[in-house]
Image: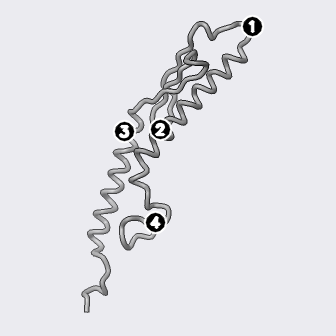
Amino acid sequence: MIPGGGQPNMQQLLQQAQKMQQDLANAQEELARTEVDGQSGGGLVKATVTGSGELRALVIDPKAVDPEDTETLADLIVAAVQAANENAQALQQQTLGPLTAGLGGGSGIPGLPF
């Protein structure tokens, strides 16, 4: 007969969970420091966001500024920020994906339900 009914060592499970938590926290910190760009209008407007989605910079080429047509400029800004955020989301998936792969439907740690 297996001692403990063949259950995984609880201390080992806790250590694995703590390591996963630390790895996830480290990855989130890395995302907050990493910057990604997005652009629109063929580069007339460029937005920079962190990997966690915080807008850090916005560069507008003077050619994009027409006082008679601020609506187009606004559209270009929105498009550039959206492109930057899409790049940030891709970076999040790339960075956090391996760490959270099992958390929604059975973790890689035996005995843990999440």
Which comes sooner in the sequence, label 4 or label 3? 3
Circle 2: element type? loop
The reply to whether callout 2 and callout 1 are in contact (CB within 8 Å) is no
Estimate the x, y position of residue 52 in percent, counting from the top left. Answer: 47, 38
Which comes sooner in the sequence, label 4 or label 2? 2
**Gap in angstroms between the C-alphas marked 3 and 2:** 9 Å
Residue depicted at x 49% and y 65%: 105
Residue depicted at x 39% and y 53%: 99
Q: Residues within 10 Å of mark 2 (few under 14, many from 20)?
A: many
**Gap in angstroms between the C-alphas marked 2 and 1:** 35 Å
Which comes sooner in the sequence, label 1 or label 3? 3
**Gap in angstroms between the C-alphas marked 4 and 1:** 55 Å
Which comes sooner in the sequence, label 3 or label 2? 3
Estimate the x, y position of residue 28 in percent, counting from the top left. Answer: 40, 43
**Gap in angstroms between the C-alphas marked 1 and 3:** 42 Å
List the residue tagged with mark 1. Answer: 68
Residue depicted at x 31% and y 87%: 5
List the residue tagged with mark 3. Answer: 30
Q: Nearer the viewer, mark 2 or mark 1?
A: 1
Answer with left or right where residue 60 lies relative to residue 99.
right
- The quarter in which the N terminus is drawn is bottom left
Q: Which of 6 and 94 lies nearest the eye of the viewer?
A: 94
**Gap in angstroms between the C-alphas marked 4 and 2:** 24 Å
List the residue tagged with mark 4. Answer: 114
Residue sitting at the far front: 42
The reply to whether callout 4 and callout 2 are in contact (CB within 8 Å) is no
